[in-house]
Amino acid sequence: MMMTININNSNKNNSNNHSKLRYISSAISVIFMLVAIVFISVNGLNWGLDFTGGVITEVQLDPSITMSEISPLLQSALNQHVSVIEGGDVGRWILRYAEPAAGMNIPDITQVLAPLATNIQVLNTSIVGSQIGQELAEQGGLALLVSMLCIMAYLSYRFEWRLASGALFALVHDVLFVLGVFAALQLEFNLTVFAAILAIIGYSLNDSIIIGDRIRELLILKPTLAIADVNNQAISATISRTLVTSGTTLMTVSALWLLGGGPLAGFSIAMFVGLIVGTWSSIAVATTLPELWGLNASHYQVVELEEDLTVGK
């Protein structure tokens, strides 16, 4: 009997410790969200050429010339950051830079790159106006809004609103955190980073749904169990899957970050930060908020009773 009491006390202590960790993590997450909002409001995002417009030039150079040789010459001549991307074919490069100020001409890329080679071919030069960039920004924001609304509708159908609110808050938390990092460090925000944010939403939503499904099952199977213990058991049951999924994805993203070069740096950084924060928020934030809303087994018992009555009719 004494051993049973000791084991029960030990389990309760472990459950209390897990709950405290969730509460502390959630509080830290809220603080980080507020800090991210401050950085976004004060610094703003460093919009890339995809959104602000600029000049795109395609050149053909000697195959032996590398990106590390091209970038310093262009940045020195243009006095700005120049995006240098491989064009697919050997020796073909895509150069992207801001449009010169009024009254200034587009520099002659052939003369700028003359120290590297003599057989330089400028294949194409086009100017992307700021109006197009503004339309991209508006369409991107609209796409993000539509995706969030669809997620809200899905979560409302899948879960009771208290449990759905936790998953939705976790998504908002992840997006704000990544945007806050880019605003704080003034990293370039372009279409690849925007694509990374949409991918982060998918990963975070997947983790939140897995844990939410487990919470719902436990509320139905163990209606007398305290909601804090239900959350802790649900996290324990899914933690290995969550860590394995996020860990393997982080390995891939890390490889892109280290080996992908400048063109993939923004995408890789956004994905790396988003995966870590998304895993954190799915475990802590998405489970703690429903608990604060007063989620309990009776909410899902009512749903089951209504479904039974509907089937009976």
Image (cartoon, helix red, strand yellow):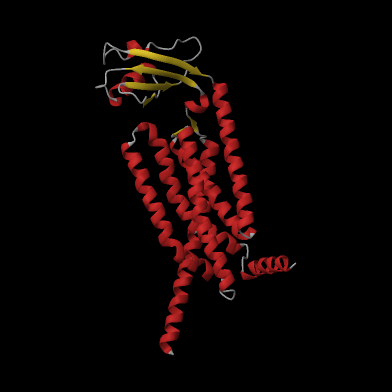
So how many labels did they put on this image? 0
At 47% from the left and 29% from the top, the residue drawn is 48
Residue 26 lies, in percent from the top left, at 51, 57
Is residue 27 at all visible to an observer of this figure? no
The quarter holding residue 119 reads top left
In the displayed structure image, the side of residue 273 where residue 296 appears, left or right: right
Residue situated furthest bottom in the rendering: 1
Looking at this rendering, what residue extends furthest in the left direction? Answer: 64
Relative to 72, 234 lies left or right: right
Q: Which residue is drawn at 53% across and 39% down?
A: 40
Is residue 301 depicted above or below 141 in this figure?
A: below
Query: Residue 276 in the image: x percent, y percent?
Result: 42, 50
Task: Examine the image and state in which quarter residue 114 appears.
Answer: top left
Note whether 65 is above or below 262 in the view shown. above
Q: Where is residue 274 in the image (x, y as percent from the top left)?
A: 45, 46
Q: Position of residue 257 (x, y in %)?
A: 35, 39
Image quadrant containing the N terminus: bottom left
Residue 13 seen from this side:
yes
Tell me the quadrant of the picture where the C terminus can be found: bottom right
- In the image, residue 22 sits, relative to residue 115, either above or below, namely below
Residue 233 lies left or right of residue 80; in this view the side is right
Is residue 246 positioned above or below 110 on the image? below
In this orientation, which residue lies closer to the viewer: 270 or 309? 309
In the figure, is residue 144 to the left or right of 68?
A: right
